[in-house]
Image (cartoon, rainbow, N blue to C red):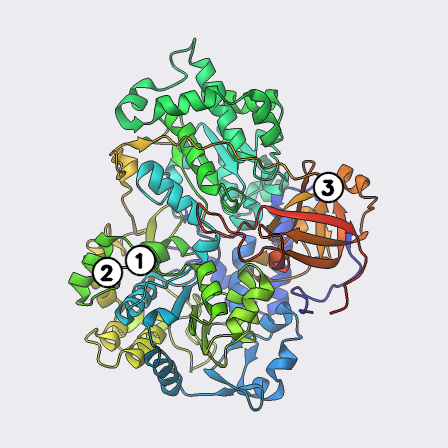
Amino acid sequence: MEPEVGAAPAGPPSVKPYRHPAAGWGAAKSVTKVLARTGEWVDGPRAILKMNHENGGFDCPGCAWPDDYKGLHLDICENGIKHVTWEMTGKRVTREFFAAHTVTELSGWSDFALEDQGRLTEPMVYDPESDRYLPIDWQRAFDLFGEAVRGLDDPNQASFYTSGRLGNEATFLYQLMARELGTNNLPDCSNMCHEASGRALQASIGTGKGTADLKDWESADALFIMGVNAASNAPRMLTALADATRRGAQVVHVNPLVEAAATRTIVPHEFLDMALMKATSTSTLNLQVRIGGDMALMRGIAKAVLELAEHDPKAVDRQFVERYTTGFEEYRALVAATPWEELERQSGLSRPQLLRAAQVYCEADRSIFSWCLGVTQHEHGVDTIREIVNVLLLRGNLGREGAGPSPVRGHSNVQGNRTCGINHRPTAEFLDRLAEVCKIDPPRAHGLDTVATIEAMARGEVKVFLGMGGNFALAAPDTVYTYEALRNCELTVHVSTKLNRSHLVHGRQALILPCLGRTEQDRQRGGLQATSVEDSMSMVHLSRGMRKKPASRQLLSEPAIVAGLARAALPDSATPWEWYVEDYDRIRDTMSEVLDGFEDFNRRVRLPLGFRIKQPARELVFLTPSGKAEFSAAPLPDVLPAPGTLVLGTMRSHDQWNTTIYSDDDRYRGVKNLRTLIFMNRQDMRERHLDEFTPVDITATARDGSTRSLYGYLAVPYDLPRGCAAGYMPEMNVLCAIGDYSTQSDQPIMKHLNVTVTAAAGRPAE
């Protein structure tokens, strides 16, 4: 039995509807509690004033929402402040801590308790005889890694994982090391989150990124927000939503749950509204699709638009479609052949609701569609996003101001990671340029993504695993299987700021390498350094840590750690690893030669707010096989649950960031002191004779027929469509079988688990 993830509950569980605006005084009160808990009454407020500022500020290590281009002085949010103060804690994990606790003992601690011990202070190596982590000097740690990698029979027996917190410069060096070693095994967190977005957009419009920017959001007539809990996952989006409703734009939220961000908000930096407690609406329409029903909704909008076009020539932008797209006639025939009854059944919406959404779209001259994991983490995620693009193409909502696709990335630099080379399926063009500029011979075969890496570790084919940030063991699907796979490695190495579960689920040898945080100054031989990041709208800007004294003198920067590992693994390498680390401008100069859009990198990144990477599709240049934007004609998936089952989607609580749990509360959903729950439709509960807080067992059935269960969770009635349920990750990751990933994107289908829920019968004997 694995330990709990969250904090020890502060009292009995309770659920009470949250009827206050998102953000506002609730967020202010929460921030005050965070500052009090961490004791950061000086550096905490200083960090708030420095975060997301282009002149000498540091980029929030939380979400990837773009910085305000007008120079907003408090471009912050509650979760960003939590994330920063969590990093700035005065608590330390020292060698004395590890001497006092075995790994076996720590494995019984909750994940909250592990991270709550504070910042890691020096490199540590696992000692199997004492079952403890012991201090090791940096060079010996590098050498241990180098010896393990050089001892492999094949470089593809190593895999190099990246979390979205890694800066662009370290990212570039990291992928360069892997490819010089001879492997494209570069899994990343995008494999679990937005892989579907990249593949769909690449196929439809020839770019793996959205085309809209923040200025477009400010001029759109309609915003469709799909599968996003903005108040928790991208809280600074609330400003854009409030601004939109004020100017009369339509804001349509598409989500099985009506989240707090889809109601109203008080934006904290709007001081008069805060003083007067004046809330602003953040939506004009809420559509509660069934889980996985987004594609049916999009096709319903398309069907209404095409039917309207039969007597209204302005409904479809014929000139745009004829000049810039291909595949329209096939798509039109497919839509016409799809009955309204089927669209209602699959979306969970009535025909009037579908027509209302289409009306909003048709009446808007400029529309943006934005989405997150509620759309991507399905078998049909790629088809759904291509359907979104189909709808945009019908009315020419691409290549002009106030329009376009706009995926919401959930981690601060996950998009920058992919831009700067973290890709297990690199293009030939990228590899050619890397070879020419960096004088290496990179491998050409595709490497392993996240799921394939786990499976290869389980088979003993990947023997060395290096995790650059994140908490891989908790973030991945099929928790038990993933744990066994990691323990099957010869060496696991994790570059981290805090103690987490991945350090305790380790290979036969294991290293913990502590790094500087985003808030800390990074000094190298060339002086004070800055790193760059890319937000979810393709803006690249510098981030400079503000804290002069790091958590420990023994911390190294991420570029320095990568360079040390690379030199140890590639002792005869001609790559000037040490020279690069002395001055990050040198890394950026090389990046400017390798990466499209990074020309004149060092000058442009120092401009106010940095620079935006060009998106060819925004200029109506489509790098597709046809040279045009391509309509897709995918069949409509059947997303209805089988009789007696529910479709369950995993999600984060509000007091959580990725796998980091701040408390057992979920303020915006009204939950206190409870994480081991399942949200259910009230009628679904009645059919199963369940009351509020009835203990239940949840069993997921995988494609291969195997089952995985959670026991004694509490049933909580919630406003969800029939047949749908929801609960928190990472606890529920155990329910997603390693083989249950999308055949379109290879993403684990965390939002579409087929489960049965019954009154608890108790955990079976093991």
Residue found 62% across the figure and 38% down from its top = 256
Q: Position of residue 442 (x, y in %)?
A: 24, 64
What secondary structure is found at the residue carrying circle 1? loop
> Looking at the figure, which quarter contains the N terminus?
bottom right
Q: Is residue 379 above or below residue 168?
A: above
Q: Nearer the viewer, residue 7 or 565?
A: 565
Q: Amino acid at mark 2?
A: Met
> Looking at the figure, which quarter contains the C terminus?
bottom right
Residue found 68% across the figure and 59% down from its top = 664
Q: Badge 1 is on which residue?
A: 420
Q: Position of residue 437 (x, y in %)?
A: 17, 63
What is the crowding at mark 2: few (fewer than 14 residues within 10 Å), some, or many (at least 20)?
A: many
* Gap between marks 3 and 1 measured at Cα: 47 Å
What is the crowding at mark 1: few (fewer than 14 residues within 10 Å), some, or many (at least 20)?
A: many
Q: Badge 3 is on which residue?
A: 644
Q: Is residue 673 left or right of residue 256?
A: right
* Gap between marks 2 and 3 measured at Cα: 54 Å
Q: Position of residue 407 (x, y in %)?
A: 44, 43
What secondary structure is found at the residue carrying circle 3? loop
Q: Amino acid at mark 3?
A: Gly
Q: Is residue 150 above or below residue 434?
A: below
What secondary structure is found at the residue carrying circle 2? helix
Of the numbered discs in the image, which one, if any, rests on residue 591? 2
Q: Residue furthest bottom?
A: 129
